[in-house]
Each structure stands twice: as C-alpha cells, then as structure tokens.
C-alpha cells in the first residue's frame, strides 16, 4: 500500500480529517455505512468543493482502490454513478480493474487518433485487446 493511501486510512481510523481527500473519503464511508452508497450529486451538495476538485479526487482514490463505482441512481432526471467505500480485501482487484479500464480507454483513443501511424498488424492486434 502506498504511503499516501496508508496516511488517508490512518486519518480516517483516527478521526483526524486533514485534507480534501480524507474529507471526501469520510463522506463516502459515512454514506456507505448508512445506506450502502452515495453519488457525486450527493457529495457535491454536501461538501464545499468545486465539482472539478471533487471528481479529480474521486478519480485518484478510485485509482488507489479505496472506492468502488457501480450501477446508477436517477436523481432529478439525471443518472449518477453509485459510489461506495471499498472493503480492504477487494482493493487489489479494484486497482487492477481500474488500471485495465484506463489502459483500454488509452488503446481505443490511440487507435482513433493515431492509427495512420501504426502498421496494419499492430493496429489489428490492438483492436483485438
């Protein structure tokens, strides 16, 4: 586990919230404990952070396997992804799945934007991923 992740978890366990990241993690943990999940919509209304800050931190803690995103909830005719605090035993798998998701997006974007630079055999191999 990375030192910054251990630090966030220690802050949460000790009830010492020192950063925007641990503030967001604490809110997600509280919602998960109370009703099983939260959404960006709920966090945005509850926390005093700009939307871009909130989503950037959510992306970072998702990369570290601390939260899981799944399913959707409809709020005011808009769909929002459900977010829950991840259990310790699932964090390694969540990190792997997130890395794989980002890699796949990178390949798709690369094929779309730069396929003219790739030999046909490599392009076909990447499309098979």
Image: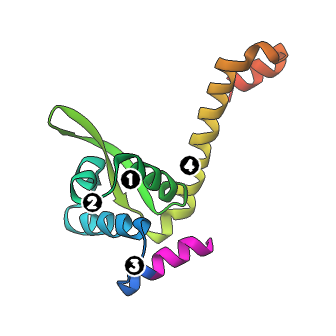
Give the CA separation, mark 4 to mark 1: 21 Å
- Which tag, 1 or 2, sits closer to the chain's start? 2
Q: CA distance from mark 2 to mark 4?
A: 28 Å
Which callout, 3 or 2, points at the residue further toward the start of the chain? 3
Q: Residues within 10 Å of mark 3 (few under 14, many from 20)?
A: some
Local SS, label 3: helix
Spatial CA distance of label 1 from label 3 is 18 Å
Q: CA distance from mark 3 to mark 4?
A: 24 Å
**Mark 2 and mark 4 residues within 8 Å of each other at the beta carbon:** no
Farthest bottom residue in view: 14
Q: Are marks 1 and 2 in contact (CB under 8 Å)?
A: yes
Residue 94 locus on image (x, y percent): 52, 56
Task: State the separation of the CA atoms marked 3 and 2.
Answer: 17 Å
* Residue 82 at x, y percent in the picture: 31, 48
Query: Residue at point 21% right, 53% down?
Result: 45
The question of residue 26 being in magenta is answered with no
Which residue has dot 1 on it? 54
Where residue 46 appears, x then y in whole percent?
22, 59
Label placed on residue 97:
4
The N terminus lies in quadrant:
bottom right
Q: In the figure, is residue 10 to the left or right of 50? A: right
Crowd around label 1: few <14 · some 14–19 · many ≥20 (10 Å)? some
Query: What's the distance in space between the residues labelled 1 and 2, CA to CA?
Result: 9 Å
Nearest-to-viewer mark from 4 and 1: 1
Residue drawn where x is 64% and y is 18% of the image: 112
Instruction: Say few, some or many: other residues with alpha carbon within 10 Å of mark 2 (under 14 / 14 to 19 / 20 or more).
Output: some
Instruction: Return the residue at label 2.
Output: 47
Chain-order first, disc 1 or disc 3:
3
The magenta segment: 1-10
Compared with 51, 7 (above or below) is: below
Q: Please say if 93 is above or below 79.
A: below
Q: Secondary structure at mark 1?
A: helix
């Amino acid at each position: 586990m990375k030192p910054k992740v251990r630090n966030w978890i220690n802050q949460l366990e000790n009830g010492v919230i020192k950063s925007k990241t641990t503030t967001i993690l604490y809110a997600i943990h509280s919602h998960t404990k109370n009703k099983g999940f939260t959404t960006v919509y709920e966090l945005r209304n509850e926390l005093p952070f700009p939307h871009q800050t909130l989503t950037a931190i959510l992306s970072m803690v998702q990369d570290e396997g601390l939260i899981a995103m799944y399913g959707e909830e409809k709020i005011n005719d808009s769909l929002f992804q459900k977010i829950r605090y991840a259990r310790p035993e699932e964090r390694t798998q969540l990190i792997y799945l997130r890395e794989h998701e980002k890699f796949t997006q990178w390949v798709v974007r690369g094929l779309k934007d730069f396929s003219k630079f790739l030999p046909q055999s490599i392009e076909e191999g990447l499309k098979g991923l």
